[in-house]
Amino acid sequence: MKITAIETIPVQVPIHPERAIRSGRGSHIVSPFLLVKVHTDEGITGLGEVSCTPGWSGEDQVTAAHFIRNFLAPLMIGENPLHIEALTQRIQKRIAHNAFTKAALEMALWDILGKTAGLPVYRLLGGPVREFVPTKFSITGVEPEKAAEIGAWAVEQGFRKMKVKVGTSPDVDVARVMAVRAAVGPDIKLGVDANGGWSPRVAVQTIRRLMEADIYFAEQPVQALDMAWMADVRSQVAVPVIADESLYTLQDAMALVRAGAADVLSVYIGKGGGIGPARKVAAVAEAAGLTCTVGSNLELGVASAAMIHLAMATPGIGAEEYPCDILGPFFYADMLLADPLPIVGGQARPHEKPGLGVELDEEKVEHYRVK
Ligand SMILES: [Mg+2]
């Protein structure tokens, strides 16, 4: 089998205006994503999704299409798509950074492998280590009353664990989390995600104040600029610290472990450049006695499916304690899939079909295509 062409489709699907994420790192109110189709000479097509935002990884659908067309497609066309590891190495070396762009191609190769073998990707990765993927809701950093309303709504949707976005201003952060706690009651597990919005000193002070709201983790309290900041905060607070923006590569994972800077690693398929790289990060966490969760850049259907396969088959992802952020259907007008993923409040499941198990709804894709 050979790769014959790589097609890219820029899409933009509206995000629910009230639930759209605002946090210490700014707002995620539009998703300038790129769908990818890797075509082969045997009629099998692999699907991928560049779930990128400029503020997160410095990519958007224009940069992704450029790098795929001019740099990555030329080294993949004519190659055997089943040589996933070798192609991933070549993709990684061809251009620096742009991890979400690379990940779209890697996940498409897994889709082709699964369709060729007649097996879902999670079975190719070793089979299920859980019945379903536990998920948590993410409450945007809006004013306390509005956040409380969203929290109550999320409970109605079936979520038992949530995180609240903080990192805007300490007093409002505390008021927001307290309001959500009052709205959801004592039995819901609540964490906070500052997206690097606090200084080390403010992080320690604010996390200590938030203990009154019975939080059970603090995600990325400080910026990723210096790992020592995270280690400093972690040594002074009573809750586990999750590293998100501080972690892109396998070497970041190792550095976080060495620095004692995190208790939990937030792995993404996008951040390391694919499903394989994400599993390597999870193995580092396992070796260090840490655990992982799967974080989100608000993926649409194709990349959400890839996240579900990853979490279904990876024991280093401790999704029961730190549920994954696989939340697209709660945010988007449409996930662009012909057959919606079985994602409900608190639980995500893969389709039991070959590859990623999803097909695009081509009419919807056309509707949301950026022209
Ligand atoms: Mg995060």
Image (tube, rainbow, N blue to C red):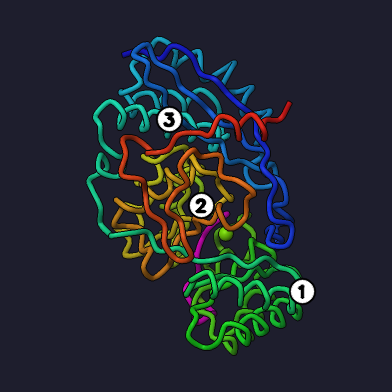
Placement of the C terminus among the 4 image quadrants: top right
* Residue that carries the numbered disc 2 in the rendered image: 247
Per the rendered image, the range of residues in magenta is 236-245
The image shows residue 335 at horizontal and vertical percentages of 56, 44
Task: Find out if the beta carbon at label 2 lies less than 8 Å from the nearest ligand 1 atom.
Answer: no
Above or below for 310 versus 124:
below
| Residue 148 visible in this rendered orientation of the protein | yes
Task: Find out if the beta carbon at label 1 lies less than 8 Å from the nearest ligand 1 atom.
Answer: no
> Element under label 2?
loop
Query: For residue 244, what is the image quadrant?
Result: bottom right
* Residue that carries the numbered disc 1 in the rendered image: 143
Kindly identify the residue that appears in the image at 51 percent across and 18 percent down. 6
Give the foreground label among 2 and 3. 3
* Residue type, numbered disc 3: Ala
Above or below for 252 versus 216:
above
- Is 221 placed left or right of 113 in the picture? right
- Crowd band around label 2 with a 10 angstrom C-alpha radius: few (<14), some (14–19), many (20+): many
The image shows residue 337 at horizontal and vertical percentages of 51, 39
Instruction: Name the dominant secondary structure of the magenta segment.
Output: loop
Kindly identify the residue that appears in the image at 53 percent across and 56 percent down. 327
* Residue type, numbered disc 1: Glu
Q: Earlier in the sequence, mark 2 or mark 1?
A: 1
Placement of the N terminus among the 4 image quadrants: top left
